[in-house]
Amino acid sequence: MSGNGENDGLIEFYASEALTCPRRIYFRLKGYPPKWPEFVRVRLNQGTNTHQILGQILQELFGVELEKHLVLRSSKLGFEIHGRIDAFKEFPIEIKGKTSLPKVPYDYHLAQLNVYLRWSEAEYGYLYYIKLHEEPMKIINKLDISSFPVIKGPNFRVFEVPYDKSLFKETLRHFYRVKKAYENDRLPEGWKSYACRFCPYRYICYPDRDWEDSE
């Protein structure tokens, strides 16, 4: 895939959609309005605040570039992938705010970071998981960032991740299958998993349930 040229009518996917539910991507492409459950909106706001504060600190101390936009484009496949790297300085850093920290990275987070690695041609990137809090500085103040890009501290977990060529090919296949479903007006299979509780389109898949239910 190339990072040059104009859109040329190509379908746009987002790096954050890499290896996520095909049906969720399909609904976005079809223009259905997202309706986030209230408890998810709260987490999204906390995550945004955490991103901004931690990002600004890393920018001031280490000169990282924040929210770096990228595009990977393939006229042959008929689509392009847009992304916004949370922090970038020769290598990409993806920051994920979570209510609980995973012991290993989520597959779709690895796939998202892997897109950034492909674009930047970096050998390694970093996944930061930080616990969400109404006051992010209460978490951030306890972190040791002296060994950046490795950060240590409670309620924080970092993973150094190498570029994975096979994972990138899998990501392209995933997007291509969604593209074909979209072009053929054929609803793809959904995940039908725990993740559905957090999806802004679950009101379509489960119309008889109250999608505004809290946790």
Image: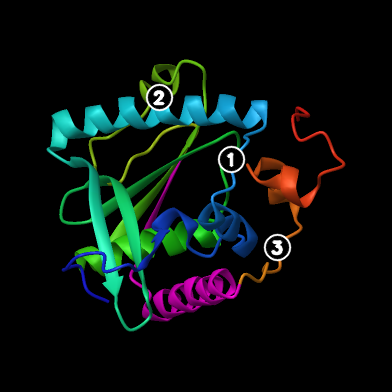
Q: Is residue 168 magenta?
A: yes
Residue at the location (41% across, 56% down)? 14
Vertical position of residue 183 compared to residue 139: above or below: below
Q: Which residue is mark 2?
A: 49
Residue 119 at x, y percent in the picture = 24, 66
Q: Is residue 161 visible?
A: no
Q: Is residue 5 left or right of residue 162?
A: left
Q: Report the amino acid beneath label 3.
A: Gly
Magenta segment: does it hold 200?
A: no
Secondary structure at badge 2 equals helix
Q: Amino acid at mark 2?
A: Asn
Q: Which residue is mark 3?
A: 190
Gap between marks 3 and 2, in whole Å? 30 Å
First along the sequence among labels 3 and 1: 1
Task: Point out residue 2 in the picture as x, y percentages from the top left corner.
Answer: 22, 74
Mark whose residue sits in front, 3 or 1:
1
Most foreground residue, 23 or 62? 23
Question: How much space separates mark 3 and mark 1, taking CA atoms?
Answer: 16 Å
According to the image, label 1 marks what residue? 34
- Mainly helix, strand or loop, the magenta region? helix
N-terminal of the pair, mark 3 or mark 2, is: 2
Q: What is the crowding at mark 1: few (fewer than 14 residues within 10 Å), some, or many (at least 20)? A: some
Tell me if residue 64 comes above or below residue 139 in the rendering.
below
Location of the N terminus (image quadrant): bottom left
Residue displayed at 24% across by 56% down: 70
Q: Is residue 17 visible?
A: yes
Q: Which residues are magenta?
A: 157-184
Marker count (numbered): 3
Residue 26, x across and y down, in percent: 58, 60
**Near-viewer residue (121 or 161):** 121
Q: Amino acid at mark 1?
A: Pro
